Amino acid sequence: MDRRNFLGLAGGAFLCTIAGKQYSIDSNTDLAALANKIEVPPKVAAAKRSNSVSNADISGNRKEYWIQAEPVTWNVVPKQRDQMMGTSIKKTVGRTKVPAYAYRLYDTDFSKPLGPATVPGPLLDVTVGDTLVVNFRNACDVPVTMHPHGVFYSNEMDGAYKG
């Protein structure tokens, strides 16, 4: 099992085993209403108006990805097993499928999907010195963000303010 699958499965297992407590996910949260209550930080608003790019040592290739955030029905325990604890999940209370937002990798110009939408999103493979270009399209009804690891960018753009 690779790291991405492990993290995805561990996240689902964690939801089902938090300190031995039972949680119900039988009702949906109005994410649009919650997002509208959060003020956009001034530096993020300024960056949206600006066309500036951070200066970094650019010496490699240009790698370009096309990613769309989209609503999905996510099964938090697809195999009915808690992979971390090695036990089965009994479907006695609540549901295991919930509305969620996932990320789907597309071919150039969003011409065709290259696989299913996933949580976490697709792996973006670059090498130190490469220029990473992400063309992002939001098909959700609320603002969503991406948070890459190991990529040079300003703190205001880390994808955490509304995500």
Image (spheres, grey):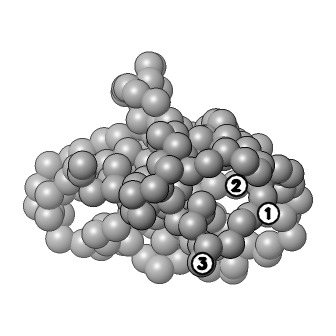
> Mark 3 or 1 closer to N-term?
3
Labels 2 & 3 near each other (Cβ < 8 A) = no
The location of residue 52, given as percent across then percent down, is 45, 66
Which type of secondary structure does the marked residue at label 2 adopt? loop
Which quarter of the picture shows residue 33? Answer: bottom right
Residue occupying image coordinates x 86% and y 51%: 27
- Mark 1 is on which residue type? Ala
Front one among 137 and 147: 147
| Picture layout, residue 124 above or below residue 44 | above
Q: Position of residue 81 (x, y in %)?
A: 47, 48
The residue under the point 45% across, 56% down is 87
| Whether label 1 touches label 2, CB < 8 Å | yes
Quarter of image, res 60: bottom left
- Marks 2/3: CA–CA distance: 31 Å
| CA distance separating discs 1 and 2 | 7 Å
Judge from the rendering whether residue 122 lies leftward or rightward of residue 11; answer left or right: left
Q: Which residue is mark 2?
A: 143
Query: Above or below — where is 151 with respect to 2?
Result: below
Q: Residue at x 27, y 57 (%)?
A: 3
Given the current orientation, which residue lies at the most extreme left position? 59
The amino acid type found where label 2 is placed reads Pro
Mark 1 or 2, nearer chain start: 1
Task: Specify the amino acid type for callout 3.
Answer: Ala
Left/right placement of residue 9 relative to residue 16 reads left
In contact (CB < 8 Å): disc 3 and disc 1: no
Image coordinates of residue 94 in percent, x first then y, are 77, 49
The tag on residue 19 is 3
Residue 75 horizontal side relative to residue 86, left or right: right
3 vs 1, front mark: 3
- Quarter-of-image position of residue 95: top right
